[in-house]
């Protein structure tokens, strides 16, 4: 294997943080491979009112920019395994292919999944949302609800009190976490514990929520929480025990891991599920990776010694 067969950095993830990092490093003339298999069901849906804030539009534009860079490429695949030697990482993806890289950036993906309610998709972008900071202002003073039964749903409900005097939290048949017992008392948040059967409205405008017991609650805007797909398991495989200092409210905030060439970045922090904040985090992570690569070029890490059999071409499985 020749030196030009080795990537400077492989990025695991396909959200705004990963995309921004890939573009920055590609513009720094680094040989970048983005392993992007995180296309969530929300990626294909655009917000017709606020396109500039829409994650799907951000990702679409980012992919166009990435494809223009000569040293950057992408594959629709997930990183399944990582092995490390003295000079870098052997990375295996779920498409059966492998590659070698001097550094590895693990970007936790923001996995947005709709609530399991019939007909919910048609309201997304107009009266169904994820982040209060992105869409709360448009629904100020209206009847707002939150669906979910985790800590994130409780946090969203409390944040929405900035824009409306009262919020209804629909646990959809699930049990709320203990944090709700501590944070909700005394707050103008009504809790509905039954299962949601469906949403009702005109066109894309939500008007009410229909419960399984037959009751109907008025609702003009509904927010929901989404999960984060973490790559901490991959970090553990190469011996990284993520220090407590690298956590903040359960999300990643640092980029170094204590393992030479291994970096981490998170998709959102403190519940701010906005593409712009994740993208900024990716830019900072890219700067940390590039700085490390500059230092590595003056050390033994500049000459790869591990030579696995690889069959990875720039255009294979390209997005």
Image (cartoon, rainbow, N blue to C red):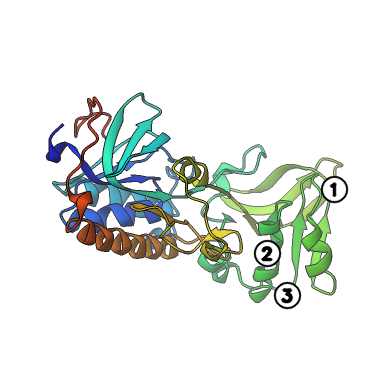
Q: Position of residue 76 (x, y in %)?
A: 34, 34
Tell me what residue is drawn at x 20 percent, y 61 percent: 294
Helix, strand or loop for disc 3: loop
Residue at 85% across, 70% down: 185
Q: CA distance from mark 2 to mark 1?
A: 25 Å
Characterize the local packing of mark 3: few (<14), some (14-19) or many (20 or more) Cα atoms within 10 angstroms.
Answer: some
The residue wearing badge 3 is 165
Mark 1 lies on a secondary structure that is: loop
Q: Distance from label 2 to label 3 (Cα)? A: 16 Å
Closer to the eye: label 3 or 1: 3
> Which residue is labeled 2 in the image?
155
Is residue 247 shown above or below 171? below
Left or right for 145, reference 23: right
Tell me which corner region of the image, top left, top right, bottom left or bottom right, holds residue 24.
bottom left
315 up-or-down from 45: above or below:
above
Q: Nearer the viewer, residue 84 or 220?
A: 84
Residue 16: x, y in percent? Answer: 39, 54
Q: Earlier in the sequence, mark 3 or mark 1?
A: 3
- Whichever of labels 2 and 3 marks the residue nearer the N terminus, that label is 2
Say if 184 sits above or below 20 in the image: below
- What residue is at 53 percent from the left and 59 percent from the top? 243
Question: In the depicted view, which residue is nearer to us: 252 or 304?
Answer: 304
């Amino acid at each position: 294997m020749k030196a030009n067969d080795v990537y400077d950095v492989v990025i695991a993830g396909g959200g705004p943080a990963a995309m921004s990092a890939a573009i920055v490093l590609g513009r720094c003339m680094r040989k970048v491979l983005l392993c992007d298999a995180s296309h969530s069901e929300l990626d294909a849906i655009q917000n017709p009112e606020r396109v500039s804030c829409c994650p799907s539009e951000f990702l679409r534009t980012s992919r166009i920019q990435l494809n223009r860079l000569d040293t950057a490429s992408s594959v629709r695949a997930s990183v399944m395994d990582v092995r490390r030697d003295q000079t870098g990482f052997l990375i295996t993806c779920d498409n059966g292919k492998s590659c070698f890289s001097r550094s590895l950036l693990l970007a936790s993906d923001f996995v947005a999944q709709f609530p399991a309610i019939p007909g919910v998709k048609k309201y997304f972008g107009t009266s169904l949302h994820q982040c209060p900071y992105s869409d709360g202002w448009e629904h100020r003073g209206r009847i707002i609800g939150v669906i979910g039964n985790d800590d994130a749903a409780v946090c969203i409900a409390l944040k929405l009190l900035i824009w409306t005097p009262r919020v209804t939290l629909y646990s959809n048949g699930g049990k709320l976490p203990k944090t709700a017992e501590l944070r909700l008392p005394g707050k103008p948040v009504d809790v509905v514990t039954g299962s949601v059967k469906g949403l009702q409205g005109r066109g894309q405008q939500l008007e009410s929520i229909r419960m399984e017991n037959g009751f109907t609650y008025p609702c003009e805007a509904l927010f929901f929480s989404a999960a984060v797909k973490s790559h901490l398991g991959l970090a553990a495989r190469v011996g990284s025990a993520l220090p407590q200092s690298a956590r903040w409210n359960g999300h990643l905030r640092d980029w170094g891991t204590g393992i030479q060439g291994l970096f981490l970045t998170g998709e959102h922090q403190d519940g701010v599920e906005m593409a712009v904040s994740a993208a900024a985090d990716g830019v900072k992570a890219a700067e940390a990776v590039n700085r490390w690569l500059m230092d590595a070029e003056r050390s033994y890490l500049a000459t790869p010694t591990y030579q696995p059999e690889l069959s990875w071409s720039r255009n294979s499985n390209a997005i």
